[in-house]
């Protein structure tokens, strides 16, 4: 039984009016939908009443009005409307189908086959809404012999090749120090979803978007694929070195480290002048980029020069001397990153509300001149917008709503 419906709260930005059903947990998925929310989409985050997104239990925590609240959760779920819905129940699945009938996108990150077992797969839901764009993010994709394997970010780093080529030369490989498999899959899912939206606006037809973490990581391996397919070279850990560009890496200074990347003839010329040693410009052994790339010549001649330039100066001194003219930057700690006046000027650290408490999280790198991204919306409390979405937008009457609450459906 339904009653008069009310419009959903709309975001601000180029995706204003686009409605996204978010059936995702952790990061690969929530980050995708948060980017869409930053761009103005209305995102309805669905969580199981008995098992909310377990990132809500991830540190760091703040003391909110309802107890401990996760700042980590807030960082990936700002702007969203929070709805609790038990998809293991038939009534919960029916309510999701009703929501899908009014939405534009659904994003899910269950293991392949899980949504189909619940009758919530794309082939089923497209009958409810032929315009539906259904985005699936998984470890290994929806097809292929490994599709149904469970996966985490580390699974993608391991099987996508990135882990094998990261770390110090001659030592065992190291995982990349962030959840790059989750993050890159979220990026690709958002891009593909927006491409599908454009097509849907033109054709009136939705489609299924399949993004795998493993696939996403493979595309982050830079030179490694063509080095192997062309020359048979298998990428291995190189530490802070580049496979062939030199000088281009980490150098110690008085109070830490800097990245020095003045490897082209233009920048090398500028560096030699900045550091008061123009004689190297006519040295016949290192006077061209090709010569400086040679591993033996670099180690014997070029590296000691750059090391000496950096060793007697602080990060701040090197930045003031050279960063405006050559690619040389301090390797900053996270404390220095958060305090960076340039990043602050670009609004890359923004206040986000979680359970009534303000935390500072990263902003958005997407800068649009006419329809700017909005990044300061609150993360939802668990089930906070049940009535707004289910009663107000879907039109469920009070009697049915209270029954669903009593039955644990919401």
Image (cartoon, rainbow, N blue to C red):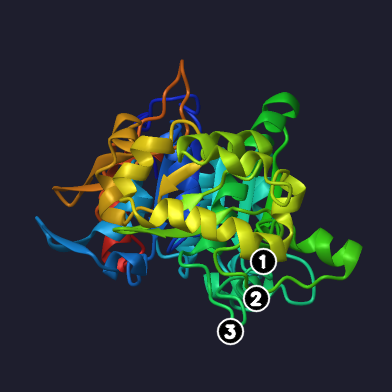
Residue at image mark 3: 172
Are dots 2 and 1 in contact, CB under 8 Å? no
At label 3, counting other C-alpha atoms closer than 10 Å, the crowd grade (few under 14, some 14-19, many 20 or more) is few
Report the residue at 58% width, 67% height from top.
118
Nearer to the camera, 28 or 319:
319
Report the residue at 33% width, 34% height from top.
342
Q: CA distance from mark 2 to mark 1?
A: 14 Å
Circle nearer the N terminus (1, 3)? 3
Label 1 element class:
helix
Q: CA distance from mark 2 to mark 3?
A: 8 Å
At label 2, counting other C-alpha atoms closer than 10 Å, the crowd grade (few under 14, some 14-19, many 20 or more) is some
Report the residue at 51% width, 47% height from top.
98
Circle nearer the N terminus (2, 3)? 2
Is residue 121 among what the camera can see?
A: no
Nearer to the camera, 206 or 220:
220
Residue 164 marker: 2
- Using residue 194 as the reference point, say whether residue 389 is left or right of it: left
Looking at the picture, does residue 282 appear above or below residue 91? above
Q: Nearer the viewer, mark 1 or mark 3?
A: 3
Label 3 element class:
loop
Label 2 element class:
helix
Residue at image mark 1: 214
Q: CA distance from mark 1 to mark 3?
A: 21 Å
Is residue 387 among what the camera can see?
A: yes
């Amino acid at each position: 039984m339904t009653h008069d419906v009310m419009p959903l709260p709309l975001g601000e930005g180029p995706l204003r009016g686009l409605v996204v059903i978010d059936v995702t947990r952790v990061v690969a998925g929530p980050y995708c939908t948060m980017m869409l929310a930053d761009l103005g989409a209305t995102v309805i985050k669905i969580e199981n009443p008995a098992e909310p997104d377990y990132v809500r239990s991830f540190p760091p925590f703040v003391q909110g009005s309802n107890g401990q609240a996760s700042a980590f959760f807030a960082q990936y779920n700002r702007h969203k409307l929070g709805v609790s819905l038990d998809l293991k129940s038939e009534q919960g699945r029916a309510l999701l189908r009703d929501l899908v009938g009014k939405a534009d996108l659904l994003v899910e990150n269950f293991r392949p086959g899980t949504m189909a077992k619940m009758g919530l797969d794309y082939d089923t839901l497209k009958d409810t809404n032929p315009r539906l764009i259904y985005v699936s993010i998984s470890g290994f994709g929806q097809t292929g012999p490994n599709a149904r394997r469970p996966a985490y970010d580390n699974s993608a780093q391991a099987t996508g090749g990135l882990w094998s080529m990261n770390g110090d030369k001659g030592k065992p490989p190291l995982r990349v120090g962030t959840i790059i498999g989750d993050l890159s899959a979220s990026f690709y899912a958002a891009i593909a979803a927006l491409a599908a939206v454009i097509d849907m606006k033109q054709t009136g037809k939705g489609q299924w978007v399949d993004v795998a973490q493993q696939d996403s990581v493979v595309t982050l391996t830079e030179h490694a694929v063509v080095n192997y397919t062309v020359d048979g070279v298998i990428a291995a850990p190189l530490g802070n070195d580049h496979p062939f560009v030199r000088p281009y890496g980490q150098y110690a200074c008085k109070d830490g480290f800097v990245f020095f990347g003045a490897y082209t003839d233009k920048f090398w010329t500028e560096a030699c002048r900045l550091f008061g040693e123009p004689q190297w410009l006519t040295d016949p052994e290192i006077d061209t980029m090709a010569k400086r790339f040679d591993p033996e010549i670099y180690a014997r001649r070029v590296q000691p020069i750059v090391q000496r330039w950096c060793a007697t100066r602080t990060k701040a001194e090197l930045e003031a001397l050279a960063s405006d003219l050559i690619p040389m930057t301090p390797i900053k700690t996270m404390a220095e990153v958060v305090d960076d006046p340039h990043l602050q000027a670009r609004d890359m650290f923004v206040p986000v509300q979680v359970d009534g408490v303000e935390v500072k999280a990263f902003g958005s790198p997407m800068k649009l001149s006419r329809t700017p991204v909005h990044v300061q919306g609150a993360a939802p409390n668990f089930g906070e917008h049940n009535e707004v979405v289910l009663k107000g937008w879907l039109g469920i009457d009070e009697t049915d709503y209270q029954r669903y609450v009593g039955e644990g459906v919401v």
